[in-house]
Image: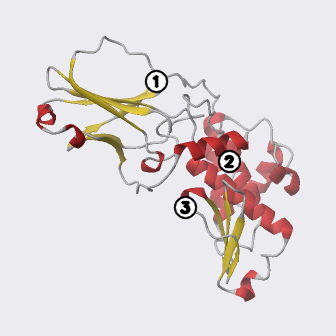
Amino acid sequence: MNLGAARPEPWLAAVFEGSGALLWWNVETGASGGEIWDEARADAWIRAPRVTAFARAAALASWREAWWPASELAGIAPLDPRLLAAERAVALAALDGVTDDDRAAARAFADLAFWTAQLGPLDELDGSVFEEAGVAVSADLARLADGYGVGPADAPAPRPHDYALAAAGRAPAAALASGSAPVDPGAVPQGAVDAFARIEWRLTATMTLEVEVGAAPVIGPPPSVALAARVGPVEVPLSRAAGVWTGRVENAGGLLALPEQQRAVRLVAEGFDPLPGVRPETLRRIAQDWS
């Protein structure tokens, strides 16, 4: 049995799966809906406003973790991973018995412990999910986590993170061929690449293919991603440093024999399944409205 609005495209859907039912929220329109496959189990929770409020909070935290379009170019600041982990952990703790996964809250608190070890404890807990759960300070989070067997981690002092795009360290060689394309945010994990950057490539007179694309700004360590660019049939492994991904391969002169339309460039991330149809401008609008 379906409820409410139809389920949106996957990249617009904040989803929570509970016992006997799945709920979703469209992050672009705010519309909500769901699917019930076991009424007896779902009736125990699905019509309780307080419960569905926590379900929505958990779903939205997971969506922002997956799709938030942090960008230097668009002026969209990165989200604090500690806050996302805390929101999800508090919401899932309030949903104990609602999900069939009895380790969901424990894993969320373990994520929070990891990020506080990297960045230090949260100074402020601002948000309706914390207020609704009666969580006001970091000590409240620690008490909740302890109930799931997750203890505090030693937290090193946070260190500044360089968000600026790197300036070129040398004058570029003359190019025999070059091109660019916009980033497809559905082709790479969130936090890897600036969603509004362009992928730039050039083939030098020494037949070296060089590629560059802006990295997404992050708080804390960047995600570990094996990223490469493909210019036509040539794959260029990329490495991230100082806010930019760069890479180069030698002996790429075969590109000159290809017609221009076969020199298209795109990004590929190892182990990541691309999701077609993601619209950067829609993500920009959602992020701006969230602010």
Q: Quadrant of residue 161?
A: top right
Instruction: In the rendered structure, find residue 10 and report the number of the disc placed on it.
Output: 3
> In terms of depth relative to the viewer, which is nearer, 105 or 261?
261
Badge 2 density bin: few <14, some 14–19, many ≥20, Cα 10 Å: many
Q: Is residue 227 left or right of residue 243?
A: left
Q: Is residue 65 left or right of residue 262?
A: right
Q: Which residue is mark 2?
A: 84
Confirm or deny contact between disc 3 and disc 1 (CB under 8 A).
no
The three-letter code of the residue at mark 3 reads Pro
Element assignment for label 1: loop
> In terms of depth relative to the viewer, which is nearer, 100 or 202?
202
Image quadrant in which the N terminus is located: bottom right
Q: Quadrant of residue 16?
A: bottom right
Instruction: In the rendered structure, find residue 242 and report the number of the disc placed on it.
Output: 1
Rendering coords of residue 251 (x, y %): 12, 31
Distance, label 1 to label 2, CA atoms, is 25 Å
Q: Is residue 195 left or right of residue 150?
A: left
In the picture shown, does residue 23 fall above or below 66?
Answer: below
Which residue lies at the image location 65% right of the left edge and 75% below the top edge?
100
Which residue lies at the image location 47% right of the left edge and 54% below the top edge?
277
Confirm or deny contact between disc 3 and disc 2 (CB under 8 A).
no
Rendering coords of residue 184 (x, y %): 44, 45
Q: Earlier in the sequence, mark 1 or mark 2?
A: 2
In the picture shown, does residue 186 fall above or below 118?
Answer: below
Q: Earlier in the sequence, mark 3 or mark 2?
A: 3
The three-letter code of the residue at mark 2 reads Leu
Rendering coords of residue 265 (x, y %): 30, 40
Distance, label 3 to label 2, CA atoms, is 20 Å
Instruction: Please name which of the two marks, 3 or 1, marks the residue nearer to the observer.
Output: 3
